[in-house]
Structure formats: C-alpha cells, structure tokens
Image: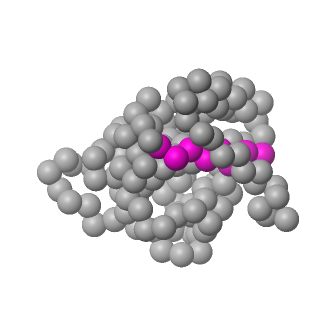
C-alpha cells in the first residue's frame, strides 16, 4: 500500500520540493508530478543544494534511465518509488508508487483540491501523515 504524506502550509511549490528532497528523498526513482512549468521545475532542481539529474517530459520505455528523476504527468515504470505531487490536481496512478508526497501551498484553490484528495485517500483506507512545512522550517 502506498505510504502518503501531505506537506502542507508551504509558501510555494519550489520551496516545498526543496524541503522534500532534503528531508525525505532517499535515492528513489522519482516522478515529480506537474502539469506545467516543467522548465521552471527543472531549473530549480539545478539550483538546489545537492545533485538531482533528471529528465523532463516523456521518457522512452525501452531505455533504462541514467537519472533518478522524471518531471511530468505520465506514469513511467522506471520512476515508481516516490511520487511528489506539486500540482493542484489528482494523480490517478498514485497507487503504483511506494511513497507519495503531496505538496500543498497556501493558495486557497490548491488547499481546497488537496482537502478533497486527503478525504479521498482516507476514504480508500490509506493512512495519511500530515506534516506542517512551517514547523519544519522554523
């Protein structure tokens, strides 16, 4: 069963992603789930402390990846250990991953959508761990 964490009260997705990589990433094959802004996310990964080589968009199924990260919105079976959702929408294939981290900013629309996802996960029987970003950064 997928382990689900909600990192909430985040000031923006970039800072949330940075915190996730510093505190929760453990060399897993990772999909950073995002519908748009792939270039901005890619640029951010190169600016973070640490080294996070990655691919953006679709990745060929027949190639073994040379990086641990894929930024996009499609499932790829090589990147199935950690899912980091930095979008405002559901990731319908979340249960294919060992771990899911939902990054929830302070934007009202994003919070509302996250509340709906939280309710849905709990209704499906998932145990959800809530993590307050502000407590981790103070």
Q: Is residue 55 left or right of residue 17?
A: left
Residue 93 appears in which quarter of the rendering? Answer: top left
Of residues 81 and 85, the one nearer the viewer is 81
> Where is residue 62 shown, x and y percent of the image?
14, 51
Vertical side of 47 occupied by 127: above or below: above
> Where is residue 43 shown, x and y percent of the image?
52, 60
Which residue occupies 66% across, 54% down? 16
Question: What is the span of residues highlighted in magenta in the rendered image?
Answer: 2-9
User: Extreme right residue here?
Assistant: 138
Vertical side of 113 occupied by 38: above or below: below
Q: Is residue 60 left or right of residue 82?
A: left
Vertical side of 123 occupied by 107: above or below: below
Q: Judge whether residue 37 can be spotted in this image.
A: no
Which residue occupies 43% across, 49% down? 98
Of residues 74 and 28, the one nearer the viewer is 28
Q: Quadrant of the C terminus?
A: bottom right
């Amino acid at each position: 069963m997928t382990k689900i964490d909600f990192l909430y009260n985040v000031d923006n997705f970039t800072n949330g992603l940075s915190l996730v990589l510093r505190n929760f990433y453990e060399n897993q094959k990772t999909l950073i789930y995002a519908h748009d802004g792939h270039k901005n996310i890619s640029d951010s990964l190169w600016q973070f402390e640490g080294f996070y080589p990655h691919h953006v968009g679709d990745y060929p199924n027949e190639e073994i990846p040379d990086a641990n990260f894929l930024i996009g919105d499609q499932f790829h079976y090589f990147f199935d250990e950690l899912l980091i959702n930095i979008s405002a929408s559901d990731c319908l294939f979340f249960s294919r991953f060992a771990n899911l981290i939902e990054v929830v900013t302070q934007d009202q629309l994003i919070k509302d959508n996250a509340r709906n996802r939280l309710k849905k996960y709990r209704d499906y029987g998932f145990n959800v761990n809530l993590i307050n970003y502000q407590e981790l950064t103070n």
